[in-house]
Amino acid sequence: MEYVIIQISGKQYFMELNKWYDIDFIRDVKIGDIVVFNKVLLFYKNGMVQLGFPFLININICAEILRQVKNRKIVVLKTKPKKHYTRTQGHRQKFTRIILKNSI
């Protein structure tokens, strides 16, 4: 079993090989592209743990882009009492779905 802890856009993700994850939206990529992450905090493979201070230098993680999708809609409602003011707004956050392929 192989897993890593990666920092992507200021957030830390615990990821395992051949599983998909939803991360923040990555622009200018297409479905099927390979993305390389180099901010690896921890790498575990076959009982051996490598820990970075703060990042591991020689390890890069490859991931394939599966989808570029939007999340569920969130409804934001603003009201001001006694002023007859109500404002409704919806928001759908974009995210990128990736699958971890292998490490270099």
Image (tube, rainbow, N blue to C red):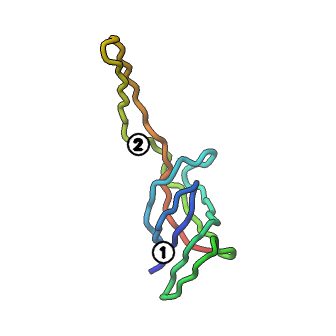
Residue located beneath label 2 in the image: 71
Q: Residue at x 53, y 84 (%)?
A: 49
Residue located beneath label 1 in the image: 3
Mark 2 neighbour density, 10 Å: few (under 14) some (14–19) many (20 or more): few
The outermost residue toward the bottom is 47
Dividing the picture into quadrants, the one containing residue 9 is bottom right
Q: Where residue 97 appears, x then y in whole percent? A: 48, 53
Closer-to-camera residue (93/36):
93
Q: Residue at x 35, y 19 (%)?
A: 80
The outermost residue toward the right is 57
Give left or right: position of 75 versus 41: left
Inspect the image, locate mark 2, and give the three-letter code of the amino acid beneath it: Asn
Q: Is residue 36 above or below residue 104?
A: above
Q: Where residue 90 appears, x then y in whole percent? A: 40, 29
Give left or right: position of 5 versus 71: right
Q: Where residue 29 appears, x then y in whole percent? A: 61, 49
Q: Earlier in the sequence, mark 1 or mark 2?
A: 1
Q: Where residue 66 appears, x then y in whole percent? A: 49, 54
* Residue at disc 2, secondary structure: loop
